[in-house]
Amino acid sequence: MTLQETILKLTKQLYPTGRAFKMPAGSFFEKLHKALAVSEASAFSAAKSILDSAIPDNTNFTEQDATDWERRLGMVSNPVVALSDRKLAIQRKLNHPGTIPARQNYRYLEGQLQAAGFDVYVYENRFDDGMGGLITKTPGELTGGGGVGTAQFGDFQFGDFQLGNVFDNIIVNYINEGVDNNFSIGNNLRSTFFIGGNPIGSYAGVDADRKDEFRQLILRIKPVQTVGFLFINYV
Protein backbone atom coordinates (compact mmCIF):
# COMPACT_ATOMS: atom_id res chain seq x y z
CA MET A 1 0.00 0.00 0.00
CA THR A 2 1.40 3.38 -1.01
CA LEU A 3 1.59 6.33 1.33
CA GLN A 4 -1.22 8.09 -0.57
CA GLU A 5 -3.44 5.02 -0.28
CA THR A 6 -2.71 4.85 3.45
CA ILE A 7 -3.66 8.50 3.92
CA LEU A 8 -6.88 8.02 1.93
CA LYS A 9 -7.79 5.00 4.05
CA LEU A 10 -7.21 6.96 7.25
CA THR A 11 -9.23 9.88 5.91
CA LYS A 12 -12.24 7.63 5.26
CA GLN A 13 -12.08 6.40 8.85
CA LEU A 14 -12.33 9.96 10.17
CA TYR A 15 -15.69 10.67 8.52
CA PRO A 16 -18.99 9.89 10.28
CA THR A 17 -20.75 6.69 9.25
CA GLY A 18 -23.86 8.47 7.95
CA ARG A 19 -25.04 8.04 4.37
CA ALA A 20 -24.09 11.59 3.42
CA PHE A 21 -20.43 10.87 4.14
CA LYS A 22 -20.02 7.68 2.14
CA MET A 23 -17.13 7.74 -0.30
CA PRO A 24 -17.87 5.26 -3.14
CA ALA A 25 -14.93 4.15 -5.28
CA GLY A 26 -14.50 6.42 -8.30
CA SER A 27 -16.79 9.12 -6.91
CA PHE A 28 -15.97 12.82 -7.08
CA PHE A 29 -15.72 12.77 -3.29
CA GLU A 30 -13.01 10.09 -3.43
CA LYS A 31 -11.20 11.83 -6.29
CA LEU A 32 -11.11 15.00 -4.20
CA HIS A 33 -9.46 13.18 -1.31
CA LYS A 34 -7.06 11.36 -3.61
CA ALA A 35 -5.89 14.76 -4.84
CA LEU A 36 -5.57 16.00 -1.25
CA ALA A 37 -3.63 12.84 -0.34
CA VAL A 38 -0.96 13.74 -2.89
CA SER A 39 -0.11 17.00 -1.12
CA GLU A 40 -0.48 15.41 2.33
CA ALA A 41 1.91 12.60 1.36
CA SER A 42 4.37 15.16 0.07
CA ALA A 43 4.18 17.12 3.34
CA PHE A 44 4.63 13.94 5.38
CA SER A 45 7.67 12.84 3.35
CA ALA A 46 9.25 16.28 3.65
CA ALA A 47 8.78 16.31 7.43
CA LYS A 48 10.21 12.80 7.75
CA SER A 49 13.18 13.75 5.58
CA ILE A 50 13.94 16.73 7.85
CA LEU A 51 13.95 14.46 10.90
CA ASP A 52 16.05 11.79 9.18
CA SER A 53 18.67 14.33 8.15
CA ALA A 54 18.73 15.97 11.59
CA ILE A 55 19.85 12.88 13.54
CA PRO A 56 22.40 10.36 12.21
CA ASP A 57 20.61 7.34 13.67
CA ASN A 58 18.77 6.02 10.62
CA THR A 59 19.39 4.50 7.20
CA ASN A 60 17.98 7.57 5.43
CA PHE A 61 20.84 9.76 6.71
CA THR A 62 22.81 10.42 3.52
CA GLU A 63 26.42 11.30 2.72
CA GLN A 64 25.28 14.85 1.92
CA ASP A 65 23.64 15.05 5.36
CA ALA A 66 26.96 13.92 6.88
CA THR A 67 28.88 16.56 4.93
CA ASP A 68 26.45 19.27 6.05
CA TRP A 69 26.74 18.25 9.72
CA GLU A 70 30.53 18.03 9.58
CA ARG A 71 30.61 21.58 8.22
CA ARG A 72 28.24 22.85 10.92
CA LEU A 73 30.19 21.13 13.71
CA GLY A 74 33.64 22.17 12.46
CA MET A 75 34.74 18.58 11.89
CA VAL A 76 37.20 17.20 9.37
CA SER A 77 35.15 16.06 6.37
CA ASN A 78 36.36 13.31 4.07
CA PRO A 79 33.83 11.82 1.60
CA VAL A 80 35.88 8.64 1.11
CA VAL A 81 35.36 7.60 4.75
CA ALA A 82 32.59 5.05 5.27
CA LEU A 83 29.25 6.68 6.05
CA SER A 84 28.83 4.46 9.12
CA ASP A 85 32.04 5.87 10.63
CA ARG A 86 31.05 9.44 9.77
CA LYS A 87 27.69 8.92 11.48
CA LEU A 88 29.38 7.65 14.65
CA ALA A 89 31.69 10.67 14.71
CA ILE A 90 28.77 13.08 14.22
CA GLN A 91 26.72 11.40 16.97
CA ARG A 92 29.65 11.72 19.36
CA LYS A 93 30.06 15.39 18.51
CA LEU A 94 26.35 16.13 18.92
CA ASN A 95 26.39 14.44 22.34
CA HIS A 96 29.47 16.35 23.52
CA PRO A 97 30.07 17.34 26.26
CA GLY A 98 27.34 15.23 27.79
CA THR A 99 26.96 14.91 31.55
CA ILE A 100 30.41 13.52 32.45
CA PRO A 101 32.24 15.97 34.75
CA ALA A 102 35.70 14.35 34.60
CA ARG A 103 36.39 15.19 30.98
CA GLN A 104 40.18 15.47 31.43
CA ASN A 105 40.50 11.88 32.61
CA TYR A 106 42.15 9.50 30.15
CA ARG A 107 39.13 7.19 30.29
CA TYR A 108 36.94 9.97 28.89
CA LEU A 109 39.28 10.48 25.93
CA GLU A 110 39.30 6.74 25.32
CA GLY A 111 35.50 6.56 25.44
CA GLN A 112 35.09 9.45 23.04
CA LEU A 113 37.57 8.00 20.54
CA GLN A 114 35.81 4.64 20.64
CA ALA A 115 32.40 6.32 20.34
CA ALA A 116 33.65 7.95 17.13
CA GLY A 117 34.54 4.55 15.70
CA PHE A 118 38.26 4.36 16.51
CA ASP A 119 39.31 1.01 18.03
CA VAL A 120 42.04 2.46 20.26
CA TYR A 121 42.93 2.58 23.96
CA VAL A 122 44.39 5.37 26.09
CA TYR A 123 46.91 4.81 28.88
CA GLU A 124 48.41 7.11 31.48
CA ASN A 125 52.18 7.30 31.69
CA ARG A 126 52.19 6.00 35.26
CA PHE A 127 53.90 2.75 36.18
CA ASP A 128 54.76 0.96 39.41
CA ASP A 129 58.46 1.27 40.20
CA GLY A 130 58.37 -1.89 42.33
CA MET A 131 59.05 0.02 45.54
CA GLY A 132 55.67 1.55 46.19
CA GLY A 133 56.20 4.56 43.97
CA LEU A 134 55.38 5.57 40.42
CA ILE A 135 57.58 6.22 37.41
CA THR A 136 57.13 7.32 33.80
CA LYS A 137 58.45 5.53 30.74
CA THR A 138 59.62 6.52 27.29
CA PRO A 139 58.05 4.73 24.31
CA GLY A 140 61.26 2.71 23.99
CA GLU A 141 61.17 1.63 27.62
CA LEU A 142 57.51 0.74 27.28
CA THR A 143 58.13 -1.62 24.37
CA GLY A 144 61.39 -2.98 25.75
CA GLY A 145 63.33 -1.46 22.88
CA GLY A 146 61.23 -3.04 20.13
CA GLY A 147 61.04 -0.71 17.12
CA VAL A 148 63.39 1.74 18.85
CA GLY A 149 66.26 3.38 17.06
CA THR A 150 68.37 6.50 17.27
CA ALA A 151 68.56 9.84 15.58
CA GLN A 152 72.20 10.46 16.36
CA PHE A 153 74.66 11.31 13.61
CA GLY A 154 71.87 11.36 11.01
CA ASP A 155 70.83 7.74 11.62
CA PHE A 156 67.07 8.33 11.98
CA GLN A 157 64.65 5.59 12.91
CA PHE A 158 61.86 5.30 15.48
CA GLY A 159 61.69 5.22 19.23
CA ASP A 160 63.40 6.76 22.24
CA PHE A 161 63.70 10.57 22.25
CA GLN A 162 66.36 10.84 24.95
CA LEU A 163 69.93 11.86 24.14
CA GLY A 164 68.94 13.21 20.75
CA ASN A 165 66.70 10.28 19.82
CA VAL A 166 63.10 10.75 18.70
CA PHE A 167 59.71 9.10 18.64
CA ASP A 168 58.12 10.50 15.51
CA ASN A 169 54.42 9.90 16.16
CA ILE A 170 53.30 12.34 18.85
CA ILE A 171 50.37 14.70 19.20
CA VAL A 172 50.70 18.06 20.94
CA ASN A 173 49.09 21.06 19.26
CA TYR A 174 48.57 20.40 15.55
CA ILE A 175 46.58 18.15 13.24
CA ASN A 176 49.65 18.05 11.00
CA GLU A 177 51.92 15.51 12.71
CA GLY A 178 54.96 16.90 10.86
CA VAL A 179 54.67 20.13 12.86
CA ASP A 180 54.19 18.34 16.17
CA ASN A 181 57.25 16.18 15.59
CA ASN A 182 59.39 19.30 16.09
CA PHE A 183 58.05 19.75 19.62
CA SER A 184 60.63 19.34 22.38
CA ILE A 185 59.14 17.27 25.19
CA GLY A 186 62.14 17.43 27.51
CA ASN A 187 62.92 14.93 30.25
CA ASN A 188 59.74 15.34 32.33
CA LEU A 189 57.17 12.83 31.08
CA ARG A 190 54.49 13.37 33.74
CA SER A 191 52.24 15.14 31.23
CA THR A 192 52.44 12.43 28.58
CA PHE A 193 50.14 9.55 27.75
CA PHE A 194 49.91 6.69 25.26
CA ILE A 195 47.29 5.80 22.65
CA GLY A 196 47.45 2.44 20.94
CA GLY A 197 46.14 -1.10 21.02
CA ASN A 198 45.38 -3.48 23.82
CA PRO A 199 47.61 -4.39 25.68
CA ILE A 200 49.66 -1.26 26.29
CA GLY A 201 52.64 -0.95 23.96
CA SER A 202 50.89 -2.66 21.05
CA TYR A 203 49.83 -0.82 17.92
CA ALA A 204 46.27 -0.06 16.83
CA GLY A 205 45.06 0.49 13.28
CA VAL A 206 43.31 3.67 12.17
CA ASP A 207 41.88 4.26 8.70
CA ALA A 208 44.35 6.51 6.87
CA ASP A 209 41.42 8.48 5.45
CA ARG A 210 40.43 9.38 9.03
CA LYS A 211 43.90 10.38 10.20
CA ASP A 212 43.21 14.13 10.38
CA GLU A 213 39.85 13.51 12.04
CA PHE A 214 41.51 11.21 14.59
CA ARG A 215 44.14 13.78 15.51
CA GLN A 216 41.61 16.64 15.59
CA LEU A 217 39.42 14.72 18.04
CA ILE A 218 42.35 14.04 20.38
CA LEU A 219 43.39 17.70 20.30
CA ARG A 220 39.90 18.87 21.17
CA ILE A 221 39.57 16.59 24.20
CA LYS A 222 43.02 16.13 25.74
CA PRO A 223 44.28 18.63 28.34
CA VAL A 224 46.21 21.26 26.39
CA GLN A 225 49.46 20.79 28.32
CA THR A 226 49.70 17.06 27.62
CA VAL A 227 51.57 15.18 24.91
CA GLY A 228 50.38 11.91 23.44
CA PHE A 229 52.59 9.11 22.10
CA LEU A 230 50.63 7.42 19.32
CA PHE A 231 51.20 3.71 18.77
CA ILE A 232 49.10 3.89 15.64
CA ASN A 233 49.40 2.41 12.17
CA TYR A 234 47.43 4.29 9.52
CA VAL A 235 46.09 1.70 7.10
Image (tube, grey):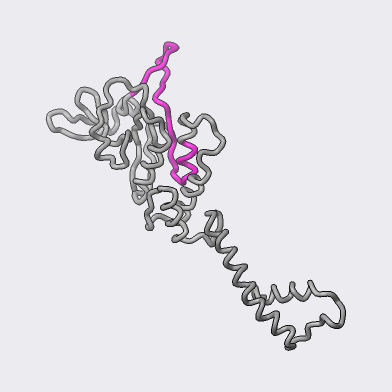
Question: Any magenta on residue 142?
Answer: no
Q: Which residue does the image show at 49% across and 38% down from the upper left?
A: 111
* Residue 62 drawn at (x, y percent): 48, 61
Q: Which residue does the image show at 42% across and 27% down from the upper left?
A: 124
Is 175 left, or right, of 95 in this rendering? Answer: left
Q: Which residue does the image show at 43% across and 39% down from the upper left?
A: 120
* Residue 119 drawn at (x, y percent): 44, 42
Name of the residue lying farthest toward the right:
18
Indicate whether 41 appears above or below 172.
Answer: below
Question: Total number of numbered labels?
Answer: 0
Residue extent of the magenta highlight:
110-137
Is 164 left, or right, of 228 in this rendering? Answer: left
The answer to which of 131 and 52 lies nearer the viewer is 52
* Quadrant of the image containing the N terminus: bottom right
Question: Any magenta on residue 126?
Answer: yes
Indicate whether 145 appears above or below 212.
Answer: above
Is 15 left, or right, of 142 in this rendering? Answer: right
Where residue 214 sits, quadrant-wise, is: top left
* Residue 164 drawn at (x, y percent): 19, 26
The answer to which of 60 and 128 lies nearer the viewer is 60
Where residue 169 sits, quadrant-wise, is: top left
* Residue 17 drawn at (x, y percent): 86, 76
